[in-house]
Image (cartoon, rainbow, N blue to C red):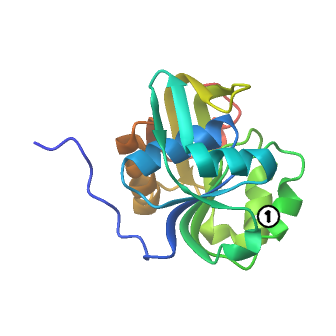
Amino acid sequence: MSVNPPRPEFARRDYEFAILGPGALGTILGAHLARAGHSVAMLARGRRAHYISNTGLTITGLEEFSAAVTVLTDPASLHSADVLIVATKTPGTGAALTRLRHVDIGVAFSIQNGTLKNDLLADAFTADRVLGSLADTSGEMLTDGRVLFTRNVNILLGELSGVLSQRARDVAAVIDSSGVRATAVADILSLSGRSM
């Protein structure tokens, strides 16, 4: 019996995953998804964009590997993605999402803390395209550009309406099968006040 879930029927946009924020968590997710064969675009700037372009997303700690991804330094160059993952620091998220309003997104979620993230995503892409999330996954950006992957417990994903949907299951299954633990749940908003 196969342990890998079937690949979800994405809409076949330009990228399966676009990740805003090439810090520790964005790098962990992007590297695992790219290594698993998914098309990944990292939205990055400056030295971080240069590093990823030349070296790839490099993970150490729980795993040791590098994965090449597409690096986009101009948000206007992203036209469509099946899944947008927001992995930036909370300040400046609204401004960053404003520059992505033109993007055709299938579904978006943020692995930031707090619930304001869902409102910002809904404002940019409409609430029906937003999944809630709660991440118990961590890492640390090292001075040499690698990311130390330190914790891989679970990323919970769910509909803001509280139902357990097939799309939340599909996205969680793809992330989980890439090596970052993820699970679809009902009532994601009720879980945000509790620790995992």
Secondary element at image label 1: helix
Q: Amino acid at mark 1?
A: Leu
Quarter of the rendering containing residue 83: bottom right
Q: Residue at x 44, y 76 (%)?
A: 11
Q: Position of residue 161 (x, y in %)?
A: 60, 59
Tally of marks: 1
Q: Position of residue 117 (x, y in %)?
A: 77, 51
Quarter of the rendering containing residue 101: bottom right
**Closer to the camera, 138 or 71?**
71
On the rendered image, what quadrant is the N terminus found in? top left
Q: Residue at x 44, y 59 (%)?
A: 165
Q: Is residue 150 left or right of residue 49?
A: left
Q: Residue at x 79, y 64 (%)?
A: 97
Q: Is residue 90 left or right of residue 133?
A: right
**Closer to the camera, 21 or 182?**
21
Q: Residues within 10 Å of mark 1 (few under 14, many from 20)?
A: some
Q: Is residue 39 left or right of residue 74?
A: left
Q: Residue furthest left?
A: 1
Q: Is residue 34 visible?
A: yes
Would you place residue 28 above or below residue 4 in this image?
above
Would you place residue 106 above or below residue 156 in this image?
below
Quarter of the rendering containing residue 70: bottom right
Residue on which disc 1 sits: 97
Q: Is residue 184 visible?
A: no
Would you place residue 172 above or below residue 28 in this image?
below
